[in-house]
Amino acid sequence: IKAFRYGVKWINGYQFTIGRMYCIDIQASTGEEIHLRMKTVYGLRRQQLHKKFQELLSALHYHFFDAMAEKYFQQFITGQSFELAGATITSAGICINKTAGVVPWSDIGVAAHREYHSIFNKLVPGQYRTFDHVSDWNAPLLYSVVRGILKEKGIEYDK
């Protein structure tokens, strides 16, 4: 597995939400993609599908994603730079977009939300980037790796 993304997409009716679609996308190193979709409308089988979604994610984390996060964390520990979910991670800091440049680790903050997370510069309010877990490849992995690095450095990271 090279990349993954997952989350819930809401199905909207005329004036209100009528259902949800649970999405899990997996990308192989060959470029092939697997798309898993489970849809519930008007609350039918919602609890069953939510349970299946959670079980699938738990199994994928246990068998694949935790090892991927550990691999990236070890690359950081050995001083290697790498790109993950469109952000470049170096020993000096993280480059969340081209205009901001590399933001030092001591200035990085992370805010988690239900369907996305953001990485921001604590000193410059306009320097931030959001990563949507359902549409950005490896966004959940980036969140995990950045939090691990900040924890390792003893930096308070939550907003």
Image (cartoon, helix red, strand yellow):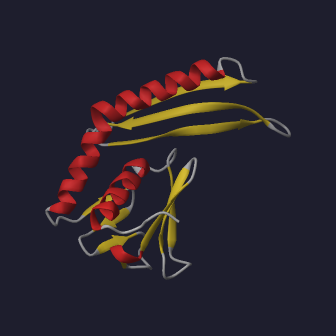
Q: What number of labels is visible? A: 0
The answer, for residue 104, to whether it is visible in the render is: no
Q: At 37% from the left edge and 72% from the top edge, which residue is drawn?
A: 95
Image position of 27 (left or right of 74)? right
Q: At 65% from the left edge and 17% from the top edge, which residue is drawn?
A: 45
Quarter of image, res 14? top right
The answer, for residue 141, to whether it is visible in the render is: yes
Q: At 18% from the left edge and 58% from the top edge, which residue is drawn?
A: 75
Farthest left residue? Answer: 78
Quick check: 10 above or below 43?
Answer: below
Image position of 50 (left or right of 32)? right
Q: Quadrant of the N terminus?
A: top left
Q: At 53% from the left edge and 39% from the top edge, which residue is drawn?
A: 7
Q: Looking at the image, which is closer to me, 4 or 77? A: 77
Expressed as whole percent of the image width and height from the top left, the position of residue 105 reads 34, 73
Q: Looking at the image, which is closer to me, 34 or 6? A: 6
Image position of 36 (left or right of 78)? right
Expressed as whole percent of the image width and height from the top left, the position of residue 53 reads 50, 27
Quick check: 38 above or below 75?
Answer: above
Quick check: 102 above or below 76?
Answer: below
Quarter of image, res 55? top left
Q: Looking at the image, which is closer to me, 102 or 34? A: 102
Farthest bottom residue? Answer: 123
Image position of 109 (left or right of 21)? left
Q: Looking at the image, which is closer to me, 69 or 3? A: 69
Expressed as whole percent of the image width and height from the top left, the position of residue 2 reads 29, 42
